[in-house]
């Protein structure tokens, strides 16, 4: 019950009390004064209530105005219209922060892509002491995926110094004993050499991967390009020995022709329900040319048994948007 509805009851109660208590003229006068006071206070409440209603209406109007179209959003301070090259989940949402800034989700996420590249943060991360070229959001998202699928064979394209192999091996070690599952990690360059000369400065405490027991227990390194016969032979031998699920991680040479070839070549090895993770699809947009992301789209034209699984982009920020490909049948 609102205060306004209470008003008449309050008046009635006071009148009733008056009727009983009326003993003297003075007393009656005093009560009349109090009555007038109550009436005045009720009016003040009414005015306050009206003001609150008006303010609430203003808030509602402002809120509906904030959910605008791209065009209107472009007029909101420094919120620009949506970049059509974005493939982030919720890319077009406007985030209004308590510092008074309104900014598009895409600018937040793509802005972080720029920070990550320009500060060379890809060399800042490590897993169990091994330099790992994965951003933290994707480390977590990939961990969730690998734990869900529990692959027996992971084909780790692009070893570099073993950071992704060690991450995969660590997760694998929690659901399979050595000899029950494996990672075939391939790179034409030896894992003792980092392709990024500056990596040592960004990760001064990083250690060599072969001093980690997980490397010896779970990883087979093949020094070759991913599509070379000896690499494919190692993958097929692993599948023959350990079975599925099979997961493919594409993180080698990030140019369109290589990624397209890898996607088309390795799609058939992915078991139903498992994934191919095509990494660094963000590069198409950063370099403004067809790259890993376009390779995914073209690869899926003929591999219609795969779907892009947006539900794997759990933290919205990912460097592999549209790159989590699940085999459906
Ligand atoms: C981005 S790094 C890989 C990072 C690593 N996966 C990690 O998360 O720490 C890319 C690596 O791919 C290797 N590479 C280049 N061409 C390749 C190919 N055709 N097959 C496999 N690896 C390749 C490069 O030598 C380089 O070490
Ligand atoms: C799909 O496969 C056909 C037949 O092999 C080929 O000609 C075509 O280029 C492929 N399309 C794409 C987008 O890869």
Image (tube, rainbow, N blue to C red):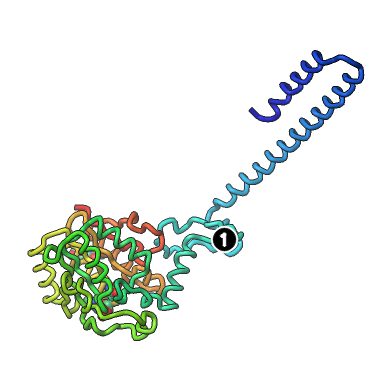
Q: Residue at x 26, y 85 (%)?
A: 193
Picture coordinates of residue 205 (x, y %)?
34, 80
Picture coordinates of residue 19 (x, y %)?
81, 14
Residue 305 seen in this snapshot: no
Mark 1 nearby-residue class (10 Å; few <14, some 14–19, many ≥20): some
Position of the N terminus by quadrant: top right
Residue occupied by mark 1? 74
Say whether residue 27 is left or right of residue 154.
Answer: right
Q: Nearer the viewer, residue 320 or 192?
A: 192
Q: Nearer the viewer, residue 276 or 80?
A: 276
Say whether residue 318 is left or right of residue 326.
Answer: right
Picture coordinates of residue 107 (x, y %)?
49, 65
Picture coordinates of residue 54 (x, y %)?
69, 41
Quadrant in which residue 321 is drawn:
bottom left
Say whether residue 239 is left or right of residue 52.
Answer: left
Q: As displayed, is residue 299 above or below residue 55?
A: below
Say whether residue 20 is left or right of residue 69.
Answer: right
Quadrant in which residue 135 is drawn:
bottom left
Q: Nearer the viewer, residue 79 or 42?
A: 42
């Amino acid at each position: 019950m609102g205060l306004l509805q209470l008003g008449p009851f309050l008046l009635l109660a006071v009148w009733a009390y008056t009727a009983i208590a009326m003993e003297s003229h003075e007393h009656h006068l005093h009560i009349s004064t109090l009555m007038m006071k109550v009436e005045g206070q009720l009016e003040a409440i009414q005015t306050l209530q009206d003001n609150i209603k008006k303010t609430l209406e203003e808030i509602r109007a402002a809120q509906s105005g904030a959910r605008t179209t791209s065009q209107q959003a472009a007029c909101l301070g420094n919120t620009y219209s949506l970049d059509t090259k974005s493939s982030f989940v919720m890319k077009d949402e406007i985030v209004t922060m308590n510092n008074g800034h309104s900014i598009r989700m895409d600018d937040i996420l793509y802005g972080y892509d720029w920070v990550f590249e320009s500060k060379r943060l890809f060399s800042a991360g490590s897993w169990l002491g091994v330099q790992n070229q994965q951003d933290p959001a994707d480390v977590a998202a990939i961990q969730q995926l690998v734990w869900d699928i529990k692959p027996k064979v992971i084909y780790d394209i692009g070893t570099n110094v073993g950071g992704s192999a060690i991450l995969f091996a660590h997760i694998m070690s929690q659901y399979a004993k050595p000899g029950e599952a494996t990672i075939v990690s391939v790179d034409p360059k030896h894992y003792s050499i980092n392709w990024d000369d500056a990596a040592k400065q960004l990760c001064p405490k990083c250690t060599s991967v072969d001093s980690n027991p997980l490397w010896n227990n779970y990883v087979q390194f093949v020094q070759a390009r991913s599509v070379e016969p000896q690499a494919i032979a190692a993958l097929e031998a692993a599948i023959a020995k350990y079975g599925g699920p099979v997961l493919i991680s594409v993180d080698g040479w990030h140019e369109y022709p290589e990624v397209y070839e890898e996607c088309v070549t390795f799609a058939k090895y992915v078991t139903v329900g498992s994934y191919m993770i095509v990494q660094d699809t963000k590069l198409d947009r950063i370099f403004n040319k067809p790259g890993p992301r376009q390779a995914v789209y073209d690869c899926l034209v003929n591999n219609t048994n795969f779907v892009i699984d947006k539900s794997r982009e759990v933290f919205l920020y990912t460097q592999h948007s549209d790159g989590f490909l699940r085999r459906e049948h």
